[in-house]
Amino acid sequence: MKTKKAFILLNGLKPTSLPDLSQYDIVCAIDGAYNFFEANNIIPDLVTGDFDSINSIPTSIEVINTPNQDFTDFEKALQILKHRGFYHIDIYGGSGKEHDHFLGNISTALQWKLGLNITFFDDFGKYFFIKESIYLTNIIGKNISLIPLPIASGVLTEGLLYPIKNETLTFGERIGARNKASKNEVQISVEKGDLLIYISHN
């Protein structure tokens, strides 16, 4: 079963708080993200990257140098975790700082949409791609946005303040931004295309 769960800290804007890291089967720092762990006396299980932004390379934990510049450090980390049988990947530090890195992280998540279950978290919310449908609970009152990249057709929602009924969303034309959960249970489905879901924490 696809139950192995990984935590990745990228070298973007660091979160003000972290989840309970003991719930993960592996905790990974990507390149310069290790600086944050080191400063906060947190010991990850794995440090990987091309090490162009790390202050010091640890010697007491697993370190994998991935100098191949054909892929980003994030992509190379996902390759390692996929090979080791991890399927659920929670990402922190994926947004903020330089926006090209943030957009690149979204592109990477889209490439891996079918192979991994990737969710990004930051201080404001979480976001992820859905494969066909998703059922969300304990969500009433939260802001929910549906972002097609670039087109998502047959989009259907239940439980949102402004329902979408078998419609097509297109980036640059019409997207489903700033909707709100009107019920405690929300269902979102898409027939074709790539749809990014954003859910606010509050």
Image: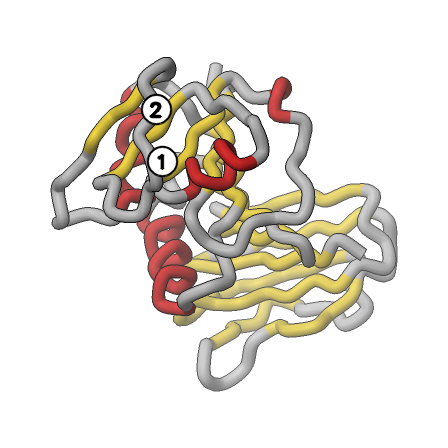
Q: Quadrant of residue 41?
A: top right
For disc 1, the neighbor class at 10 Å (few under 14, some 14 to 19, many from 20) is few
- Mark identifier at residue 129: none
Nearest to the observer: residue 26 or residue 195: 26
Q: Position of residue 65 (x, y in %)?
A: 20, 31
The relative height of residue 57 versus residue 163 in the rendered view (above or below) is above
The relative height of residue 127 versus residue 86 in the rendered view (above or below) is below
Q: Secondary structure at mark 1?
A: loop
Q: Position of residue 108 (x, y in %)?
A: 33, 51
Residue 21 visible in image: yes
The relative height of residue 27 versus residue 39 in the rendered view (above or below) is above
Q: Which residue is mark 2?
A: 58
Nearest to the observer: residue 76 or residue 176: 76
Q: CA distance from mark 1 to mark 2?
A: 30 Å
Q: Secondary structure at mark 2?
A: loop
Which residue corresponds to the image point at 36% horizontal and 61% vertical from the top-left? 101
Q: Position of residue 141 (x, y in %)?
A: 86, 59
Label pair 1/2, CB-CB below 8 angstroms: no
Which residue corresponds to the image point at 22% horizontal and 40% vertical from the top-left? 50
Q: Which residue is mark 1?
A: 115
For disc 2, the neighbor class at 10 Å (few under 14, some 14 to 19, many from 20) is some
Q: Name the side, left or right, on which 38 lies relative to 54.
A: right
Residue 193 visible in image: no
Q: Name the side, left or right, on which 128 lies relative to 113.
A: right
Which residue corresponds to the image point at 61% horizontal and 25% vertical from the top-left? 21
- Tag 2: residue type? Pro
Q: Position of residue 169 (x, y in %)?
A: 52, 73
Q: Name the side, left or right, on which 85 lies relative to 79.
A: right
Nearest to the observer: residue 194 or residue 122: 122
Which residue corresponds to the image point at 37% horizontal and 19% vertical from the top-left? 85
- Tag 1: residue type? Gly
On the rendered image, what quadrant is the C terminus found in?
A: bottom right
